[in-house]
Amino acid sequence: MELLTPSIGLVFWATVAFLLLLVLLRKFAWTPILTSVKEREHRITDAVLQAEKARAEMAALSANNERLLNEAREERAIIIKEAKAVGDKLIADAKEKAGVEFNKKVADASREIENQKMAALTEVKNYAGKMALEIAEKVLKKEFSDPQKQQSYAAELVDDLKLN
């Protein structure tokens, strides 16, 4: 029954031992444990804050990158549109210039052909006239060896010219 009813001395020494154990535990165990727990809690809080800050920065950078990408796309579209307009203008100018040059060469060629044609016709007429005169001279010399026949034929030609 002694265990059921402890003596005062046992209770006193058990209490002293318990208090001594509490003091030792507090000094050597709980304080360092609580300090390390508080430090860990502080580090976790800082890490969470830094992660939130990094997440906000990443969102801002992502939005900025998207904005820059859209601006680059718009600039590219404008540059392509301007380049196409310049290309179309150059093509139109080249076609117009080629058309003008073609028309000029055709006109020059037509003039040259006309000049060559006129020169050839003149030459043919001159040659034909010369040949006709030579033939007429030969025919008249042979046919009109008599001066009387030549005068009558000349009068006849003059009469024909007045009628025509």
Image (spheres, rainbow, N blue to C red):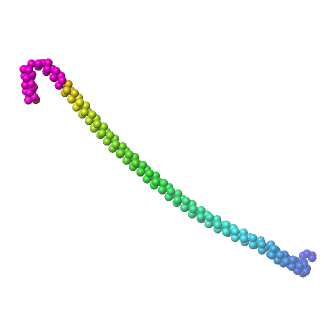
User: Which percent across, then down, holds residue 104?
Assistant: 31, 42
Residue 112 to residue 85: above or below = above
Left or right: 56, with 135 as reference point: right
User: Relative to residue 35, is residue 133 depicted above or below?
Assistant: above
Magenta highlight range:
133-162
Q: Position of residue 118 (x, y in %)?
A: 24, 34
Q: Is residue 140 magenta?
A: yes
The one of 114 and 79 positioned closer to us in this rendering: 114
Q: Is residue 156 visible?
A: no
Q: Who is closer to the viewer here, 27 or 153?
A: 153
Q: Quadrant of the image for the C terminus?
A: top left
Instruction: Tell me where residue 122 sits by quadrant.
Output: top left
Percent position of residue 29, x then y = 80, 72
- Residue 36's quadrant in the figure? bottom right
Q: Residue at the spot x=25%, y=31% of the render?
A: 120
Q: Residue at x 37, y 47 (%)?
A: 93
Residue lying farthest right? 1
Position of residue 128 in the picture relative to residue 145 (left or right): right
Q: Position of residue 44 (x, y in %)?
A: 69, 67
Question: Can you see residue 16?
Answer: yes
Q: Is residue 99 above or below residue 29?
A: above
Most common SS among magenta residues: helix
Residue 87 versus residue 65 in the image, above or below: above
70 in the magenta segment:
no
The quadrant of the picture occupied by the N terminus is: bottom right
